[in-house]
Amino acid sequence: MKITELSADERPREKMLVRGAASLSNGELLAVLLRVGQGESSALDLARQLLSLADGSLGTLFNLSPDKLLSLYGIGPGKAAAVIAAFELGRRFLQEESSVLKKPLLTARQVYECMIPQLKGLQHEECWILLLNGQNYLVGKILASSGGSSMTVIDVRQILRAALDKGASSLILVHNHPTGNPTPSQADIRQTDALRKGAGAMGLALLDHVVVADDCFFSFSEDRRCRA
């Protein structure tokens, strides 16, 4: 059925304008982005096929390559670009300065909340360094490395040099586990020890190493795994 054949309160765009975007399903929101269908398929039909291609997961959809999007009949460059742009805008919105950055970072949960917008849904590991001043306020954030699906390696000397350049008093190491299990590996433990020793030699303190999964995290300083 074409969207124009639906009643006004069932059409995704009109429904959104009257009831708000939160009232729409994921498929309806995608249909608004796609705007029009292809052949006998409406924009809503295409949106449902797109979600099916991603097994119904927005996280999987976020990570689909342009080629994979374009493999679906009815999804051309314009529609694929619209979907990719929408996800990128959402990520950038979440990365904008939040309230957690306006107060000291004192707990692993605050660190998780600060970094989960950056790391959620990634299928590769990224390692970030949070630089803090003497009052534990964030003064800088550095992408230390970006690796494969199971590990990433950091350059301790480069990190410490950047921390000193920023006038940081302490730092926090954060990286993600795409597997969804935040339990630290032996490599994680070794890198933590190396960074702690290097920081100490330079008069800096490594306050924590937080390993992030989408819905949970592990804190070295608290020595425990927590649900988000």
Image: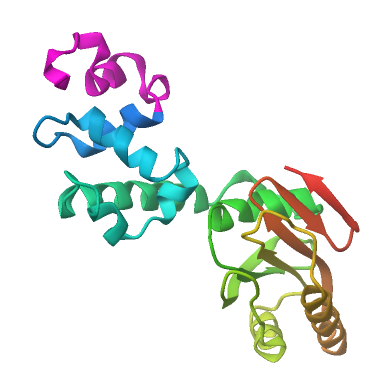
Residue 208, compared with residue 97, is above or below; it is: below
Q: Nearer the viewer, residue 190 or 104?
A: 190
- Image quarter hosting the N terminus: top left
**Location of residue 24 by image quarter:** top left
Residue 93, compared with residue 16, is above or below; it is: below
Assign the magenta stretch its main secondary structure: helix
Q: Nearer the viewer, residue 108 or 84?
A: 84
**Location of residue 19 by image quarter:** top left
Extent of the magenta region: 1-25
- Image quarter hosting the C terminus: top right
Position of residue 1 in the picture relative to residue 112 (left or right): left
Query: Which residue is depicted at the point 83% across and 51% down?
Result: 225
Q: Does the magenta portion include 192?
A: no
Q: Does the magenta portion include 5?
A: yes
Q: Nearer the viewer, residue 46 or 91?
A: 46
Residue 121, compared with residue 207, is above or below; it is: above
Query: Which residue is depicted at the point 61% across and 60% down?
Result: 178
Query: Which residue is depicted at the point 73% across and 55% down?
Result: 181
The x, y position of residue 123, in whole percent, is 53, 62
The x, y position of residue 11, in whole percent, is 23, 18
Position of residue 159 in the picture relative to residue 7 (left or right): right
Position of residue 65 in the picture relative to residue 214 (left or right): left
Q: Nearer the viewer, residue 163 or 27?
A: 27
Residue 108, compared with residue 7, is above or below; it is: below
The x, y position of residue 119, in whole percent, is 57, 58
Colour pattern of the rendering: rainbow
